[in-house]
Image (cartoon, helix red, strand yellow):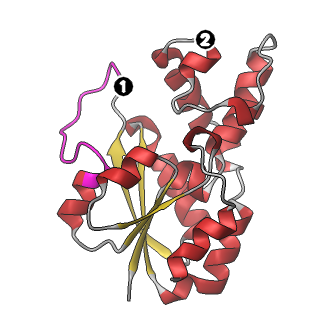
Amino acid sequence: MKTIVWDNDDVLNDLMYQWFNQKWLPENHNCLLCYEELTENPPHRILGVTLREYLQSLDEFRLSQKYQAMEPVGEVMEWFKRHGEGFRHIALTATSFASAHVSASWVIKHYGKWIRTFHFIPAMRADERHPVYDTDKAAFLKWLDKADALVDDSKTNIADCIGVNGILFPRPWNGLTTTINQALGALLL
């Protein structure tokens, strides 16, 4: 049975979209951008703030009830309902240490029927110090040596995972023009 590794934020859920519309825009009334214009991730340069300010806002959203209330991406949930039991699944995300437990809870709440393990690469913050076991997803997957496919919204994460079938998930910052269903269809080939 093949093993699929899933990024959580912006693949299983719509974190950036929800954060932007539910937190950033209400707190920054002078922002005239729309979600589709966030063509970089992280988008701090486009938003005109420091990386630290962006990450603080994102972490605040992750720790709020609004994060827990997010619904799964509809096409992804439908894919799991149709094909999920034909594969093993792992969640692998990069998130701050402070919000990892919330992310894990969200994954298990919505995808626990299929995803039985949750792993995270701590996205380091200026005031945090933790042991570093893996510097990125590629290092973790090399150590794990069990992944057949990685579904992620980052071109870098896909490119760095040598020996793993990379499925780039369409988002404004990666320039992919295929649909979510087309991207997910590649898992069945």
Q: Eyeballing the image, is 156 above or below 1?
A: above
Span of residues in magenta: 126-138
Q: Quadrant of residue 22?
A: top right
Q: Quadrant of residue 38?
A: top right
Secondary structure of the residue carrying tag 1 is loop
Percent x, y of residue 61:
62, 33
- Measuring 59% from the left and 49% from the top, which residue is drawn there? 10
Q: Eyeballing the image, is 73 above or below 47?
A: below
Q: Which residue does the numbered mark 1 point to in the structure image?
A: 125
Q: Find residue 48 and name its label.
A: 2
Q: Is residue 68 magenta?
A: no
The residue nearer to you, when weighing 173 against 79, is 173
Q: Using a 10 Å C-alpha cutoff, classify the residue at mark 1 as few (fewer than 14 neighbours), some (14 to 19) or many (20 or more).
A: some
- Measuring 81% from the left and 13% from the top, which residue is drawn there? 29
Secondary structure of the residue carrying tag 2 is loop
Closer to the eye: label 2 or 1: 2
